Amino acid sequence: MHYFVPKRCASSSKIMYHDREAAQRAADESFVERGAELWVYHCQYCGSWHLTSHQPGSYMAAPIKGQAKRHSRKRGYKPRHQ
Ligand SMILES: [Zn+2]
């Protein structure tokens, strides 16, 4: 089997993909083979496509451990004056 040596970005040293589809295919493969979910993004340094394990723009929406503390809302609870 021929071993494929991909080009790597000089800036991020990530594998360079010529187009979005090629990168997406590689991301799909990694998910199927290793269960590692990857996202495709366009690199502003080399102009090609890379994969990242961090979903771009999602860190705000992602649940942060330890910060999931929720105020327990006691519905209808009112301290009554008598
Ligand atoms: Zn790059």
Image: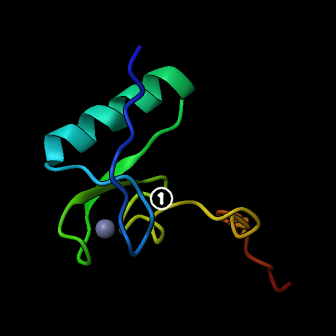
Q: What's the residue at 64%, 65% (across, down)?
A: 64
Asked if 10 appears above or below 40 in the picture, the reply is below
The residue lying furthest to the bottom in this view is: 81
> Which sits in the foreground, 39 or 6?
6
User: Badge 1 is on which residue?
Assistant: 54
Q: Residue 23 or 62: which is nearer the viewer?
A: 23
Residue 47, given in percent of the width and then of the height, sits at 17, 69
The percent position of residue 52, horizontal first and vertical second, equals 43, 55
Quadrant in the picture for residue 77: bottom right
* Residue type highlighted by circle 1: His
Q: Position of residue 43 (x, y in %)?
A: 26, 69
Query: Does label 1 point to a residue whose CB lies under 8 Å from ligand 1?
Result: no
Residue at the spot x=38%, y=26% of the render?
Answer: 29
Choose top left, top right, bottom left or bottom right for residue 81. Answer: bottom right
The quarter of the picture showing ligand 1: bottom left
Q: In terms of image quadrants, where is residue 56?
A: bottom left
In the rendered view, tell whether residue 62 sits above or below residue 3.
Answer: below
Residue situated furthest right in the rendering:
82
Residue 15 position, x and y percent, is 37, 52
Is 75 located above or below residue 40 in the figure? below
Would residue 23 appear left or right of 12 to someone viewing this image? left
Label 1: how many residues lie within 10 Å, few (<14), some (14-19) or many (20+)?
few
> Quarter holding the N terminus?
top left
Instruction: Report the side of 56 relative to 33 (left or right).
Output: left
Q: Determine whether 28 is above or below 9 in the image.
A: above
